Amino acid sequence: SRPFRVTHELVGNPLFSLPALMEVAKEASKRRGDLYADTGDVKVTDKWGKIPLVDRPIDEVIDRIQTAGAWIIMKHIEIDPAYAAVLNEFADFVQSMAPSDPRFSINNPEMLVLITSPNRLTSFHFDAEVNFLVQVQGSKRVWVCNPDDRSAITEVEIEKYYCGHQTAGTYKPGV
């Protein structure tokens, strides 16, 4: 599959306002592994685990997101019924764009919410999940490499990743 642009109606939804997401972040921080936040001047070549984690309460980081240099990810937001309703409606929308082939069905969708400071880079990585990235506020430039291009992602990197090494992917300039 290939990346494509889609229009949605989530912009302006109060569930995605910073005050609402601050509450979501506080709840996610109570669940083991459902909140990750780092900060700093990140390069595309940096590896997960080498980027400094935030050293203050998450609501304070979100309150200062414009200057914090932060990258925050909140997992399993659909635990909250209001976000579950948004997720289910959006999953139906995405499913309506997919071929009717059962291989393209959406099973067990999850909602992750990312909040990033302006101009914050995310280091090169790849994900095991199928993702549908939706921008709700601001703007973001995203580069997606061809997953079949072995000059971008090698077989060895893929094997290491699926053996538990999340930092297996290495950025290769010019690829």
Image (cartoon, grey):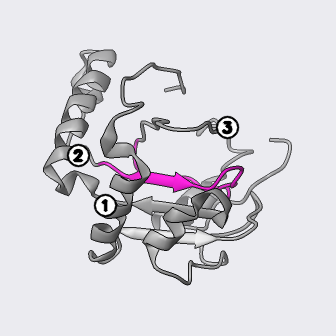
Q: Secondary structure at mark 3?
A: loop
Q: Amino acid at mark 1?
A: Val
Task: Bin the neighbour count of mark 1 within 10 Å (Cα to Cα): few under 14, some 14-19, many 20 and up.
Answer: many
Q: Residue at x 63, y 39 (%)?
A: 140
Q: Which mark is residue 93?
A: none
Q: Which residue is mark 1?
A: 24
Task: Bin the neighbour count of mark 3 within 10 Å (Cα to Cα): few under 14, some 14-19, many 20 and up.
Answer: few
In the figure, is residue 39 to the left or right of 132? right
Question: Going from the N terminus, do you reach mark 3 or mark 1 first?
Answer: 1
Q: Amino acid at mark 3?
A: Arg
Residue 142 in the image: above or below residue 64: above
Instruction: Tell me the magenta residue range.
Output: 111-130
Between disc 3 and disc 2, the foreground one is 2
Q: Nearer the viewer, residue 82 or 48?
A: 82
Question: Going from the N terminus, do you reach mark 3 or mark 2 first?
Answer: 2
Marks 3 and 2, how far apart at CA: 25 Å
Q: Which residue is mark 2?
A: 83
Q: Is residue 121 magenta?
A: yes
Q: Which residue is mark 3?
A: 141
Q: Residue at x 61, y 36 (%)?
A: 139
Q: Amino acid at mark 2?
A: Tyr
